Image (cartoon, grey):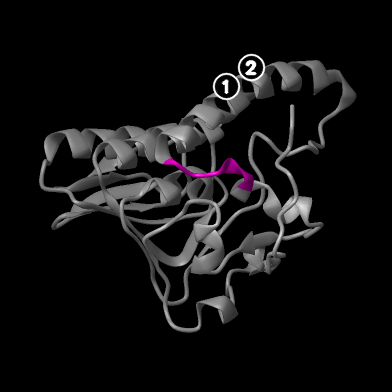
Amino acid sequence: MRRLAGLLALALLAGCATTGTNGTTRPGLAAVEVDGDTLVYRGPIEAWGFEQAHALLEMDVGIRRLAIASGGGSIEIGMLLGALVRDHGLDVRILAPGCYSSCANYVFPAGRRKTIDPGAVVAWHGSAIQERWDVPDEHEEALELYLAEARARQAAFFRSIGVDEQVTVIGQQLGCACTWFLTAEDMARFGIRDVEVPPGYAATQVAVDDQANVRLLELPATLPPPPAF
């Protein structure tokens, strides 16, 4: 699994970088720049984008906020980017069309104050603690070894930000074959607080083709127990 992940990372990291006066971008991948007191990140959660964000934060002590639009990406890099947000005490602003997968899991909840723009959503669809993984039989043993490490790191990360990691799998536990988002009140049930959502957030229509199965998840009064490993 590590070899497979490494090959995928190399594929994502391929390409030519171009540098501007206040940020860096690569065609088709993450674009990272500074706009006033805001670090702006658009694109996948991957090593190159994280490295640029880290470098800009180290250079510019005036950054107070991360504005991000991302479809997600690596579990490990998501936690690293979330740790940057946590350690620098950044507010997080979610740009349209939104923050999905590892962005929702690790970056959004790490923010000090969190704002979601009109037309954007924060949506989850699983994490290292999900119970079902569709992999060929020959990779199952390697996957289990990888997940044992990833689950331990993920648990430690969520403890560090005071958030219940069950938020990353609650839709699966409730039988939602979807990518789900939550009201601010339901986010708070998992410890994700200080969230400002736009008017009509619960009825947000996602206008991105590959996110067509995104919908609001209505939680029951009593939640199922978290996954146990």
Residue at mark 1: 6
The residue that appears at 60% across and 50% down in the rendered structure is 167
Q: Which mark is residue 187?
A: none
Residues at marks 1 and 2, CA–CA distance in whole angstroms = 5 Å
Occupied quadrant, residue 213: bottom right
Residue at the image point whose x is 77% and y is 50% from the top: 173
Does 224 appear in magenta? no
Query: Residue 139 in the image: x percent, y percent?
Result: 80, 21
Q: Residues within 10 Å of mark 2 (few under 14, many from 20)?
A: few
Looking at the picture, tell me which residue is in the foreground, 197 or 35: 197
Residue labelled with disc 2? 3
Q: In the figure, is residue 64 to the left or right of 119? A: left
Magenta highlight: main SS: loop
Q: Which residues are magenta?
A: 162-166
Graded by Cα atoms within 10 Å as few (under 14), some (14 to 19) or many (20 or more), the crowding at tag 1 reads few
From the viewer's side, name the closer residue of 177 and 136.
Answer: 177
Q: Are marks 1 and 2 in contact (CB under 8 Å)?
A: yes
Residue 82, image x, y percentages: 40, 40
Left/right placement of residue 50 relative to residue 1 reads left
The quarter of the picture where the N terminus appears is top right
